[in-house]
Structures are given as structure tokens and as C-alpha cells.
Amino acid sequence: MMSSSRNASQACASCKYQRKKCDPHCPLAPFFPHHRRKDFMNVHKVFGVRNVLKLTKNLGHKEKSEAMKTMIYQADVRVKDPVGGCCRVISELQHRIKNLEAEYRFLLEQLAVCRAQKQAKAPVHKQQQF
Amino acid sequence: MMSSSRNASQACASCKYQRKKCDPHCPLAPFFPHHRRKDFMNVHKVFGVRNVLKLTKNLGHKEKSEAMKTMIYQADVRVKDPVGGCCRVISELQHRIKNLEAEYRFLLEQLAVCRAQKQAKAPVHKQQQF
């Protein structure tokens, strides 16, 4: 049934690009259906079909699916940013963390000051006499 | 002079792998000298030499150098983590940011409470009489 649903016009994006028949065992069809042409083109441009197949051949179905998703994301970022790719995303996130940590430390200091002032301003209770 | 320094034993890691002469115009030699074999093998495994050359051919020298660095990093991460690659690094950083933001908001609330308490505990000054 699957083979009939993958006729010439519905060959996966990879087989369509390579002008070959998309058979039911096509390893890329589950990840690049015919309407995901852009995803496929990005992945092919950045990693290449052969590398993608080699990199994922020993993975189980779930892991392979996750690996494909991450490669689609990475390829998309690299095509949009050929110099930085995902490294620029990582660098920006690290920068954000550095800023957040500095703001956190500043707030911690302010809280310590506030608590010290609160303690100092609290009315001194008379010593209880027994 | 450069050509003589790139003799057979000092061909860049890419040319050495491809068993070809490394000439002074080798586009990969500046990024993969002979002692960076592992970097080259990772990049070749993940992106492939042809894709790397295609992806960087229109970049200026500085940008090309940066692009190579980011691809070397990405390839290294993908070889160590074939499923997640750089996406796992990004995901972990995003998780760290989410936690830091929550801790920051908590501290902000504590500071607001402390300031309100300090205000309430401050001794009430007698109204000045004129």
C-alpha cells in the first residue's frame, strides 16, 4: 500500500531531487516527505545525503528521527548564517547566561543590603526582666 | 617558499587524506594543517570536503576562517553526539536560561518583600510642628 501512495508525484523530497523511484524502504522518506523540499535541500547542501545516511545508519528509529530533526535545524541555521551557524546561537545564549548571572549576583547583593538595613531599623525591644 | 614547506610529509590533513599534492593554493591547508587530522576527519565525516568548500567559497578570508572554526566545532560535537549535535548544547543552554530567569524572578520578589518589611519596621517620625 505504501508503494502505491509513493507514486512519481509523491516521491520523497530526496528521491525527487535525485530523480529516482521512492520505494517503501527509502530511508529518507519518513523525514523528507515531498512537501519538505526546503528542509531536504538545506540538509543536502550542508551535510549531503550520503553523510546524513552514514551518520544515522546505526541509530534506532527514535534516535534517527531526533538526529534528523537536529540536522534539519542545524542545516537551516547554517544556510541562513553560513559563517556562524549554530555556534552563533550558542554564543548568544552563553552571552545571555553571563548577563543573567551578573544581574542575579547584583540582586543577591541588594537583598543582603536590604536585610541588613531591615535588621538595623527594627525597633530594639527592652530586655525582658524576670 | 610555501610550496617547499608543504612537502609530501607536511601536506595538509585534507590533501594527505585524499592522497594528493598539497599546493600553495590549497583552500583547506590554512584551516587543516597536517597536525589537525582529527578536526579534518570530523568535518569530512559530518559535512564532507565538497560541501565545506561550497559553503565557504563566497566568503572573505576572515569570514571563511570563522566559518571553518564553527564547522570544526559543530562537527566535533556531532561526532561525539550523533543524535543531538549542537542542538543539545542549545537546548541545555535554553534550559539553564529558563532556570536562571525563574531564580531571578524569585529573588526580585524576595527583595520587594524585604523592602516592604523594612518600610513597615522603620520608626515613625513625629510630625514636625511649625
Image: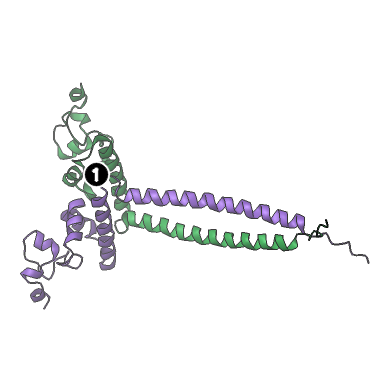
Chain colours: A purple, B green
Q: Residue at x 54, y 61 (%)?
A: B105
| Residue B48: image location, x then y, percent | 19, 47
Q: Residue at x 39, y 49 (%)?
A: A92
Identified by mark 1, the residue type is Met
Task: Report the side of B93 relative to B104 (left or right).
Answer: left
Label 1 packing within 10 angstroms: few (<14), some (14-19), many (20+) = many
Asked whether residue B38 appears in the rendered view, the answer is: no
Asked whether residue A20 appears in the rendered view, the answer is: yes
| Residue B42: image location, x then y, percent | 26, 46
Task: Report the side of A92 relative to A108 (left or right).
Answer: left
> Splitting the image into 4 quarters, where does residue A39 fall?
bottom left
B58 lies above or below A120: above
| Residue A123: image location, x then y, percent | 80, 60
Q: Residue at x 24, y 44 (%)?
A: B41
Q: Nearer the viewer, residue A90 or A50?
A: A90
Residue occupied by mark 1: B41
What quarter of the picture does the C terminus of chain A occupy? bottom right
